Amino acid sequence: MLGVLGTTAKAVRKLNFRRKSRRFIRRPLYTPEELQAQRQQHFPVEPLFSIIVPLYNTPGDFLEEMLQSVLAQTYGKWELCLADGSDNGTQVEDICRRYAREDDRIHYRRLPQNLGISGNTNACLSMAAGDYICLFDHDDLLHPAALFSFAKAIHQTGADFLYTDELIFTRTPAHPKFIHFKPDYSPENLLSNNYICHFSAFRKSLLDRVGPLRSQYDGSQDHEFYLRATAAAQKVVHIPQVLYYWRSHANSVARDLDCKAYAFHSGRQAVTDFLAEQGLSVQVESTPISPVIYRIHYPLAAPPPVSVLIPGNNNYALLSRCVESILENNTYPNSEILIVDNGSSQKKLLDYYEQLQTRHPNVRVLSCPWQTFSQAYALGAGEAKGELLLLLNPALMATQPGWIEEMVMLGQKEQTGCVGARICFPNQTIAHAGLLILPGEPPVRAFYRQSAADTGYMGRLHFAQQYSAVSGACMLVKKDLWMELGSRLPDDGWDVCFCLRLEKAGYRVLWTPWAKLTVKKARHIYPRPPSPVPRQWCSFPYDPCYNPNFCGHGVGFVPKARPFRDFPPALAANTEDKGITNKNQYNHYSEKRN
């Protein structure tokens, strides 16, 4: 339960976001003069975009506004493919044929019957002759620079799959209901929910490889297709600009998910089947906050050994509470607890160590001097028996069974570098739910002090996802990666530095809300304000797991006053980090790693 204060705070945040969204959208992305200049600009290679629009009983005024938004594009090499499955008369046909007579780039086909969303879309695809395919809904709108931005990004990055940010509106785009500022491409995020949504474009050759939309997933057909297409793509590019306007009306998913309740089952099935093709037999369930945000249970047929490393330093009350909570809530079948003690002299603590090792053969105490927690973890790693290391701050307490399993499910993946957990205060507000990285500024603690029962921005408090960094207060990492990249870490911000090293080496940093722990006080894991993140640690100009249209202060996810325009940005010039041995840099444009 949120309680009165929590509910009030949530309402205030929502009103503040809407107010700042309206301020944001009032600042035009491009001036009329800049849009006119785009019409005169040419690129060495100018792809033809086939805009795919399946029609079904589209209201006449919505249809004409959609058509006008395509005609207003500043990039002229496009064709509009319209396949009409309407069954309510000829109004849609009359409008489309009139526009097709006036512009030969518009192609219209009346279907003999409604084939469903996938069937109607595939009928559009059969008409397409373009180099790139763009998926566009029949009652939505495009920003005039949408196709120009795609062409520019293709020219500069060679992308074969692209997507943009989007705005949901009721009356006009000038009165946004919500703006979805998206992170850059992340396979983990896309498994949890279709965050890509609108507006997308992909090479026709990519479509030929992966195949068209599949009718058995109607309602979640885009999500299922995006899973296949992005997995096969060589370079997925996110354009962090609001270039798509999604209309919210009585019969749209933007207003009411229940209008397409069948999508709930098809969405879960899409994720299940996609992972089954990769040899993973998973269970997918909807989360309590939304039926189209998913929790995935990965198999743990042969659980890898896990070593829980806990620094100990003359604090019996803190350490004993941590260890006893782990022992009480540990259901993982293959684990050990290794306490790295810094020469403690407290008799009660030394007696506890002796009793602990007698009662629990999977608990060991290693006595050796250390100055910082990262040094303690480095010393413990050399003695650990586990393939996976769970670095744990002694101020934390496990509050429920299965938390180690939740982290291992993600940590066992080949491309996973480390996994962070959800840490709450006793009043069930967020202490840690991922870190937002802004080069040259202190890291932002996402959703800090917000209620854990809140959804978070776009549900982000309730699904497993990728971050650029997670807190070292609770971090699961492969032992070999820690031994390779965990040396010479700084005393301050070692966890951020280590996470960024992992990403530069080609690994993903993940966070899960399903591994839940508690901490009593903020000072136990945040003894002082975080220091700015040195720019030499980062190979990106902005956090790819965040969005440059957001502010870099507070708890994050608040729109800036002005839209972000510097796209594509240049990579940071100085990315040297002597702790890195693998120089496969994290690519800002999310290039696929083989």
Image (cartoon, grey):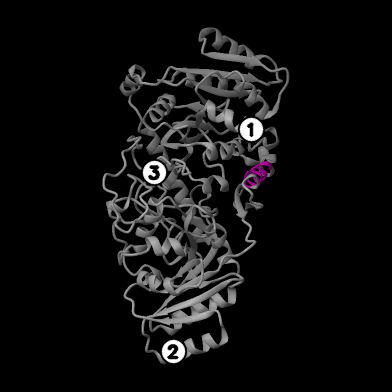
Label 2–label 3 contact, CB within 8 A = no
Mark 2–mark 3 distance (CA, rounded to whole Å): 48 Å
- Front position among marks 2 and 1: 2
Q: Nearer the viewer, residue 305 or 349?
A: 305
| Residue displayed at 51% across by 20% down | 130
Q: Earlier in the sequence, mark 3 or mark 1?
A: 1
Query: Which amino acid, by three-letter code, is at mark 1?
Result: Asn
Q: Earlier in the sequence, mark 2 or mark 3?
A: 2
- Other residues around mark 3 within 10 Å, as few (<14) / some (14–19) / many (≥20): some
Query: Which amino acid, by three-letter code, is at mark 2?
Result: Leu
Side (left or right) of 74 relative to 359: left
Q: Which residues are magenta?
A: 266-275
Q: Earlier in the sequence, mark 2 or mark 1?
A: 1
Residue 443 location, x and y as percent?
35, 56
Label annotation for residue 237: none
Label annotation for residue 350: 2
Quadrant containing the N terminus in the rendered view:
bottom right
* Majority SS type along the magenta span: helix
Residue 61 location, x and y as percent?
56, 20
Q: Residue under circle 3?
A: 587
Q: Residue under circle 1?
A: 251
Residue 208 location, x and y as percent?
58, 28
| Residue displayed at 63% across by 43% down | 274
